[in-house]
């Protein structure tokens, strides 16, 4: 098995090179711009890491509920009426999946809804 860095690791490494090797040699506007880029890379890395964690949690929930390998399989089973949509465990799973997606795509909306 080959252990290659994932996108999060690559972003972290590139950010470290930028901050440790490039930024110290810059001044003025170029330094400010490089620091903004490093900040954006840090944000993107955290989001990528959070996304990976969310995917892991969702996959675990799918397997726990009915040994489904994907949301598509679950959706197909629901559409084919193989599952009881009034089942509380299924409803909780669907809420978990929806919250995970909102947590990545629109975290402000999720925070607003759960805060009210």
Image (cartoon, rainbow, N blue to C red):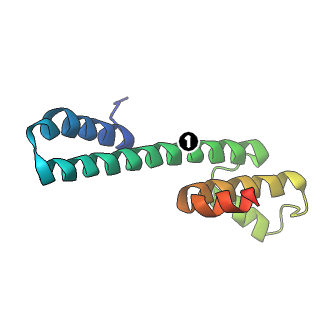
Q: Residue at x 16, y 47 (%)?
A: 31
The N terminus - image quarter = top left
Q: Residue at x 66, y 57 (%)?
A: 111
Q: Furthest-front residue in view?
A: 28
- State which quadrant residue 24 falls in: top left
Q: Nearer the viewer, residue 60 or 37?
A: 37
Q: Position of residue 112 (x, y in %)?
A: 68, 61
Q: Residues within 10 Å of mark 1 (few under 14, many from 20)?
A: few
Q: Position of residue 16 (x, y in %)?
A: 25, 35
- State which quadrant residue 110 falls in: bottom right
Relative height, residue 111 to residue 10 (above, below): below
The answer to whether residue 85 is left or right of residue 114 is: right
Q: Position of residue 80 (x, y in %)?
A: 78, 69
What residue is disc 1 on?
53
Q: Residue at x 78, y 65 (%)?
A: 78
The C terminus - image quarter = bottom right
Check disc 1 and report its element: helix, strand or loop: helix
Relative height, residue 16 to residue 108 (above, below): above
Q: Residue at x 32, y 38 (%)?
A: 12
Relative height, residue 18 to residue 110 (above, below): above
Q: How many marks?
A: 1
Q: Position of residue 107 (x, y in %)?
A: 58, 58
């Amino acid at each position: 098995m080959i252990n290659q860095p994932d996108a999060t690791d690559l972003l972290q490494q590139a950010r470290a090179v930028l901050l440790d090797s490039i930024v110290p040699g810059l001044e003025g506007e170029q330094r400010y711009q490089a620091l903004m880029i490093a900040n954006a890379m840090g944000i993107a890395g955290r989001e990528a890491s959070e996304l990976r964690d969310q995917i892991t949690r969702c996959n675990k929930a799918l397997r726990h509920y009915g040994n489904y390998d994907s949301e598509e399989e679950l959706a197909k089973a629901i559409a084919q009426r193989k599952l009881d949509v009034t089942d509380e465990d299924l409803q909780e799973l669907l809420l978990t999946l929806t919250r995970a997606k909102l947590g990545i795509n629109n975290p402000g909306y999720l925070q607003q809804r759960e805060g009210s």
